[in-house]
Amino acid sequence: MMKWVLFSPELYYVVMAAVFFFMSLERQAEPRKLYKWAVILSGVGVLATVLGARLQGTLFFDAYRIDLFSQVFKILIAIGTFWVMLVCSELKGVDERRHAEFYFLMTICTLAMMMLVSAVELLTIYITLELSSYSLFLLVPMRKHDGEYAETGIKYFMIGATASAMMLFGLSYLYGVTHTTYVAEVVKALPRVFNQPAAVLGLVLALAGFLFKQALFPFHIWAPDVYQGSTNQVAAYIATGSKMAAAAMVIRFIGFGNADSGYFVQLLMVLSVLSMTFGNLVAIIQKDIKRLLAYSSIAHAGYMLIGILTMTEQGYASAIYYALAYLIMNFACFMVIIKVADDGHNLQIKELAGLHKRSPLLAMTLMLGLFGLAGIPPTVGFTGKFLVFAAALKKGYLILVIIGMVNATLSLYYYLIVIKAAYLLKPVREYLPVRVDGVTRSLSIALVVLMICVGIFPDRFMQLTEAAAAALLM
Amino acid sequence: MASMELASFPILSTILLSTIVALLVIMLIPEDRPKLVKQVSLGFAALGVVLSLLVYVSYDVDKGGLQFVERFLWVQSIGIYWFTAVDGINAPMLILTAVVLFTGVLTMWELETRVKEFFALMYLLVAGVYGVFMSMDLFWIFVWYDVSLFPMYPLIAIWGGTRKEYGAMKLTLYLLAGSALILPGILYVWAVGGGHTFDLFELQRMGLPAHVQRIAFIMLYLGFGILAGVWPFHTWSPVGHVAAPTAVSMIHAGVLMKLGAYGILRVGMTLCPEGLGYWADLMALLATIGIVYGAFVGLAQTDLKYVIGYSSVSHMGIVGLGLATMTVDGINGAVFQMFSHGVMTALFFSAVGYIYDRTHTKMIPELGGLSNTMPVASAFFIIAAFCGVGVPCMSSFWAELLVFISAVKTYPVRGVLAVISLVVSALFMLRVVQKTFYGPRNERWEHIPDVPLALATPRIILVGILVFFGLFPRLILDVIQSAVVPFVSSL
């Protein structure tokens, strides 16, 4: 009986999903009512995960592990979901009849990702990953004017299915060479079989599935189209909540391995460098701000990987901190996009013109978010980069860090273009003033405070991330 | 004793905090009260002047070393400390910052567009500058360094003049490319030093291996050197100066460029003395090229601000040359030059700012005979020009003298070349002065009134400082020397 307490945060989301499921059976649910429920329930969900932060143990024949690492990421995912729900007040991108399904699928996806970060057995990992992917496959094409954006849905589905096929293939190889599906044991067995090509192939293919989720080069092709083609809220969700789960999974998988084998690290380094450079270079020419953020997310996956590939406790801790930072900064940017384009269209950079007049608060949130993404102090993004690079230098990867910093400078260029639009450009036509309701105002202020305070006073958070990284390696 | 009480009062943090409080207060003032914004800005700037003067005066020269130390642990696991202190090198820099901010606010008294944002950003910038000058922890030095850089972008792009967006973007990217070298440099040193402290002096005591020092020094030197306008990474500087509004040019050329030189001295040279020895030759070479190049290119300019921009390149070269000599006199002179060049350029830009505001041109051929219609405004520029060429009785005379004496001793050929180019820079300054302020009257400017007293005040303060330290150089050299002598002996 006591064991079920360990599962309580997930159980809460099961209940929440059930609530939305029954609401979706109603003929015509009132959107305002649904929104209120979504906010309240996901807010309580954050509480539930926070209360479960100190839980520890294993479930389901050791296929499911609950430790500080998984619980921290569950909190991050819950927060991401809560924030996205908060900005769903004007859910114009989705047909009103489907709002209940929208919330239902979001909840299911959140649930799946929470289970994903705890899964330590290959089949469990696969099932939870697919559950979260399939909810997203449905959420992405849910946008109105399906004709225009149907392509996105299909593309996402096809690429996603390919990635999971590759992953499954890789997992089967891993099982073949190690005769077990428990990640911990797979990893223990790996060094013995690492000379077999099948093992390397299996590991790389299995990683591909996670890297696909994280949109790391060369598994990134879906990201720009999906960001652009899906509703702003769903894009925000993919960019924040979903990213957290992917990051957690990559850290968990590599962290378990802790196989400091030369080739593997070098492979990851190459991926990281390519991801940063490609993401940043292509982002420069983007006109659509969601596409721009998609390419920047590819670059950020690369930065995060620098911390992970050090394979040290400090490195994992820095990657977790980076994930936290990324969640805050990226959501800040998406919140501004959602609010400025409150009829749900795709926002172009030039439409931000004069934002500092239309809504100074949103303009400031956007500026801080972008400066954070560029890694400018005193924002949380800077501290994240600092810690990641510090961990890498501790292992002596000086060149990698220099490439990373050069990339950060590159990225500043396109972030500055957006900031310039918000602060300098004169609008070419009269835009409606941005409506900023109480929720948005307090959320903006909270994000601004978080971005600066977590950046300047990182001590507490670092202790947390270090404890989480330690739990990971236990 | 007053100084005893002062020692326990966190006066440095108070200075830093006051700029952040100023920033917050300014942001809370309603948009339609620009006057109030300016008054608040001036008030906080004055507070900064008083506090930094207090620090300077109560700094105990005989005792030397670090004083007004505040040090406590900030982040435990990787060893970041909140560590601020004053020694003979940064004490004059704090005054410089305070004075340039104060006079800068006064210079911008007539600003009308987006006043609130302007002063808020300016305070953010100054917070960064103060932070770099007083921090002794590598993490904070870097944080404040970047904080001081990024407000430059909006400050130039919104309120700037000629080709402002281009200038702003170029400047920001150049300077942040510099910090892309500094951060790995700092982290490299930290990692080699065991990875548990960012305290500058603890790392210095550890004594890093020679090969590490060589790599780290060149990264730190180039990184900070970009901001110090080291040739060939100086090209952002004239463009940026020309594009920036007056007060920003003042702070930027007057204080911000000094951050670069200060960073080389404080971080690079302190941590990597052997690296310095290895690269000093290159440093001296680049510095000399900068001095000569700045002087010659300045000769060909027709825009007053470009002239000052290139003279800055030349003068910052003198600072670099002084540092590269690794002698007491050379470094003394370099630090003194940082101070006096700061005040002098602030005066330059402030003087040009007034002329430009009234005539709406800063092209030398279009001006001419200005000394007839506005003698006082012209006088400020001419005084700055005298200071620039190192006329005796001006503070930069002493600074340049010290640098050149030790440069000729250490690097004879380069030293002599640098001295000769001083003549060229005298030539170009006098040419500018002659064409702009003397010569035939230009009717277009007949109706322009001379500087009113209120607007003359900031310039008078700057002139006063230049002459004061020109007459009593020991008042500042003794302080600088108290830090430089032990520093050089540790090299």
Image (cartoon, coloured by chain):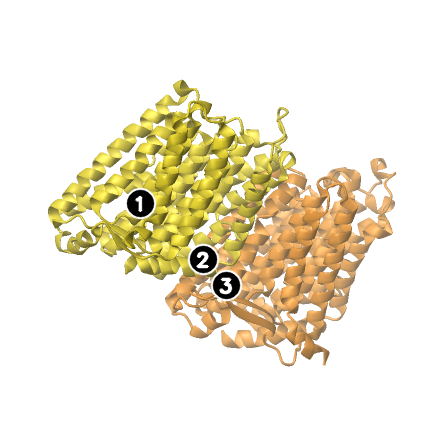
Chain colours: A yellow, B orange
The label on residue B138 is 3
Sort mark 3 into few (<14), some (14-19) or many (20+) by Cα contacts within 10 Å. Answer: many
Residue A80 location, x and y as percent? 44, 43
**Does residue A209 lie above or below B318 as drawn?**
above
What's the amino acid at mark 3? Leu
Quadrant in which residue B217 is drawn: bottom left
Callout 2: helix, strand or loop?
helix
Tag in front: 1 or 2: 1
Residue B314 location, x and y as percent? 61, 54
Callout 1: helix, strand or loop?
helix
What's the amino acid at mark 2? Phe
What's the amino acid at mark 1? Met
**Residue carrying label 1:** A115
Quadrant in which residue B63 is drawn: bottom right
For the question of whether residue B288 can be seen, the reply is no
The image quadrant where one finds the C terminus of chain A is: bottom left
Q: Residue furthest front?
A: A1
